[in-house]
Amino acid sequence: MSNENQPIYDHRLTTGITAQMNARLDTLANIRKQAKAELVREAIRFWLDHQEDAAMSRQFFTKSFQRRMDYLDWQLEVLMQMLTVLAKKPELLELAIREALKGHLTVVLQNGGLRRSAQNRKPPED
């Protein structure tokens, strides 16, 4: 690898390891013909890339974003089903609009039977 493509390691980390871990690193370094430090950096990179609970992890962000999108998709489908039912019953639509303007739309949806159509499909699982 040429010097211009080599990453700059500008931070140092010191940690203790057991004799068994050191022996395993020595063996692996000899087999791969790499420095132990590079093996340790590789292990740290792998571990960091697979941390789903780390907010900085790209994989966590991707999965979290997909869950949010799935949930929004589910909510949109439920709302479309409700709108379809309301469009067929003008009196219910009028009541829903009046109650929504008052801020009580949840009560109307529960009492109007629209909640049953939403229960036919569950929100996405994590």
Image (cartoon, rainbow, N blue to C red):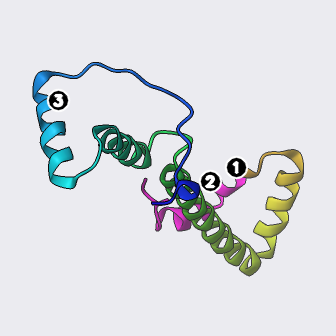
- Between discs 3 and 1, the one toward the N terminus: 3
Q: Which mark is residue 22?
A: 3
Identify the amino acid type marked 1: Thr
Residue 48 x/y as whole percent: 42, 43
Q: Are marks 2 and 1 in contact (CB under 8 Å)?
A: yes
What is the tally of numbered marks visible in this picture? 3
Q: Residue at x 16, y 21 (%)?
A: 18
- Alpha carbons under labels 2 and 1: distance apart: 6 Å
Q: Nearer the viewer, mark 2 or mark 3?
A: 3
Q: Is residue 44 above or below residue 22?
A: below
Residue 54 x/y as whole percent: 49, 39
| 33 with respect to 43 (left or right) | left
Q: Which mark is residue 110?
A: 2
Where is mark 1, residue-wise? 106
Q: Residue at x 22, y 22 (%)?
A: 17
Q: Quadrant of residue 73?
A: bottom right
